[in-house]
Image: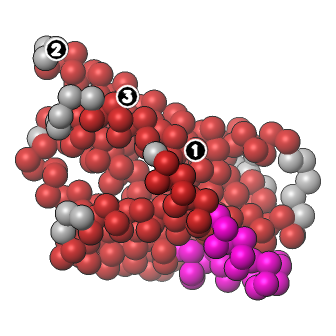
Amino acid sequence: MPPLEITVWYVLIASSLTALFTGLGILPFLFVDRISDRFLGVGNSIAAGLMLGASIGLLFEAHLISDSKLAIGLVAGAALVILTRFLLPDDDEDDQSLALGFEKASFRKILMIMAVMTAHSFAEGIGVGVSFGGREGFGELISSAIAIHNIPEGIAIALVMIPRGVSKTKAALWSIFSSLPQPLMAVPAFLFVLVFEPLLPIGLGLAAGAMIYMVFVELMPEAFEHVKAMTAIPVCLFATAAMLAFQWLM
């Protein structure tokens, strides 16, 4: 086994790379110039499906560890989004949105998606750190899977941000920012596996609960405002199935 200091740096670098991969979610938008209302509706449906598929994966992982801690996490996740809705301003053209670069954006909706995906990253960071404390090679496997898994999550974030006026560069940077908890949590989780491992199902449940709430309360209702349900629902279900298949392959 390499010295502890080198191992810690190795975990930090590996988990930082997983965060950087989230920025690759912007790639499909390099070929899209015009954002129509229909694109916004379909985009919200795809983002909802990707988040729903990711949530199902998290629920399954947490279920394998502890159903009771999963339930605690689910309630905490829904409460997080409700609290975020209550605290954030409801004005689409709030001065704060301009300060953060969301020129035409719904400040509240974007901050909510950022809060949800950041909570998701905390759970993934713990998972990476705990995995490096397991059998040899397991940490590399998990961090590689999460890095690739972060790309469609980055797409989901971009699908919410870009149609609301955020530039592609800023959307990529915000996507990476949402994954920064991964390296921040991976190192302490690696150093204190016995402390953090029992928290993993709560973190997974929290992330899943927050994303599921966002899907059904924010993203899909807005999708229905721009496209018919006969379009939005199949698109969402297809994206969910694609995300589940992607996770299964990983």
- In the rendering, which numbered label is found on residue 14? 3
Q: How crowded is mark 1: few (under 14 residues within 10 Å), some or many (20 or more)?
A: many
Q: What element carries label 2?
A: loop
Residue placed under numbered mark 2 in the picture: 2
Of labels 2 and 3, earlier in sequence is 2
Point out residue 43 in the picture as x, y percentages from the top left corner: 74, 64
x 33%, y 75%: residue: 74
Residue 142 in the image: above or below residue 210: above
- Per the image, is 226 magenta? yes
Quadrant in which the N terminus is drawn: top left
Point out residue 163 in the picture as x, y percentages from the top left corner: 78, 59
Q: Quadrant of residue 174?
A: top right
x 33%, y 45%: residue: 125
Q: In which quarter of the image is residue 201?
A: bottom left
- Per the image, is 144 magenta? no
Point out residue 180 in the picture as x, y percentages from the top left corner: 43, 41
The magenta-colored residue range is 214-239
Q: Residues within 10 Å of mark 3 (few under 14, many from 20)?
A: many
Report the amino acid beneath label 3. Answer: Ala
Q: In which quarter of the image is residue 170?
A: top right
